[in-house]
Image (cartoon, helix red, strand yellow):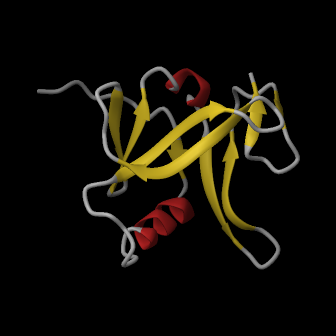
Amino acid sequence: MEPIIKNPINLTEAAINEVKRLMTEPSFEKGKILRVGVKGGGCSGMTYVLDFDKKRENDALYKKDGVDFIIDNSQSIYLFGMEIEWEGGLNSRGFTFKNPNASSTCGCGTSFAV
């Protein structure tokens, strides 16, 4: 029996529904999984990555309500406890990130510092 690993992040119900919708698009490439991560850049130092990708050697696989997602093991320290939400309103549309590890964030909400 495999050990149960707690998801390091939380995808809200709205975010899960949007990811599932994106996976039904004709342009979706079968065999790819949702990648959650970070990379250097942005006005605060680090930028969030949310994309579909193939699993790599250093990735951990997680599941949440029927959605598989991967996180590079070396990046999970920056993401632990983060919540990803989907905002579908007229004034605010897209994924938002609430990260308790961020010491500061930029105005657009897609980059942060630790």
Q: Is residue 109 above or below residue 71?
A: below
As drawn, is 75 to the left or to the right of 99?
left
As drawn, is 84 to the left or to the right of 76?
right
Q: Quadrant of residue 48?
A: top right
Q: Position of residue 97 (x, y in %)?
A: 67, 46
As drawn, is 47 to the left or to the right of 5?
right
Q: Is residue 85 above or below residue 87?
A: above
For image coordinates 82% across by 32% down, the residue present is 44
Q: Which residue is situated farthest in the right direction here?
A: 107
For image coordinates 34% across by 24% down, the residue present is 58
Q: Is residue 28 above or below residue 5?
A: below
As drawn, is 103 to the left or to the right of 76?
right
Q: Quadrant of the C terminus?
A: top right
Q: Position of residue 74 (x, y in %)?
A: 47, 20
Q: Position of residue 40 (x, y in %)?
A: 67, 30
For image coordinates 31% across by 33% down, the residue present is 56
Q: Quadrant of residue 22?
A: bottom left
Q: Position of residue 25 (x, y in %)?
A: 40, 76
- Name the one closer to the observer, 55 or 60: 55
